[in-house]
Amino acid sequence: MKIIKYDKFTDDLKDKLLNYNQVTGLVAVGSMSKQNHQPDEWSDHDFFVIVKSGYQKKFRENLSWLPDFENILLSFQETEHGLKVFYNNGHLIEFAVFDKEELFLAKINSYRILIDKANIKKNIEKIKDKTTVQTSSYIDNDLLIKQFITKLVVGIGRYNRGEIISGHQFVKVSALNKLLLLIEKNTAFTKDKLLDNLDPLRRFEFVYPELGSEINNLLLNQYLKQRKNY
């Protein structure tokens, strides 16, 4: 989606929701927030809609409040509060509908408040601070190292057994996730705003271009090194 259309969708979303008395807040998150990084033509719309208690189900089931809702190709509720909607022009949006108290179930790093009828800014700041603490301290280096090693061992074992897909998943996804967490937690770039503390894979190569290129070349390798029996 072109940026001019992306911004128009954001404006239309805000304007439509302002017509509903049940809506007390709209919070843009991720690239839609335009805080740590700007959206581009590949960006989705990610946001939270806060409504008065008792109206959550209505806004999850009846999507007529969305811009261009008549052009929705696919929509489904993915979690208790969250939905995904795919338009026939290829644009994807992801959002959750909360009341003011349910909002504390969310995790937030970058955000921008577009509608605030219920003084939600303080709550959003608390959630952001809580998310930062949780993502920086919920797991220590020793555990990450052990998880990285054992996921490599399991993955190579499965590859050798003939479980090729499972082997690649353990090595190139599960183990990689722990490795990138280790790198980001223990380098001078840890606080770089391009990084995503909810997903260590996001924009890694923008912060570590040489290392990112080397890791990507390894991921493109079709074969996993054989582990000798012992």
Image (cartoon, rainbow, N blue to C red):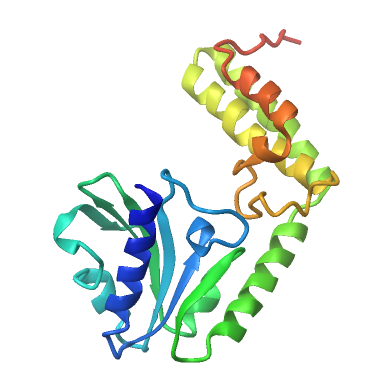
Q: Is residue 65 left or right of residue 154?
A: left
Residue 215 visible in the shown view? yes
Q: Is residue 188 left or right of residue 192?
A: right
Residue found at the very far left of the displayed protein: 70
Q: Is residue 167 left or right of residue 10?
A: right
Where residue 114 sits: x, y (%)? 45, 76
- Residue at the image point whose x is 75% and y is 53% from the top: 139
Where residue 4 sits: x, y (%)? 37, 55
- Residue at the image point whose x is 47% and y is 60% from the top: 32
Residue 43 position (above or below residue 23): above
Q: Based on the displayed image, in which of its 4 quarters is residue 210 positioned?
A: top right
* Along the line of sight, the residue nearer the viewer: 204 or 103: 204
Residue 80 visible in the shown view? no
Where residue 57 sits: x, y (%)? 28, 76
Where residue 127 sits: x, y (%)? 62, 74
* Along the line of sight, the residue nearer the viewer: 21 or 220: 21
Residue 58 position (above or below residue 68): below
Residue found at the very far front of the displayed protein: 4
- Residue at the image point whose x is 27% and y is 86% from the top: 20
* Along the line of sight, the residue nearer the viewer: 113 or 81: 113
Q: How many marks?
A: 0
Quadrant the C terminus occupies: top right
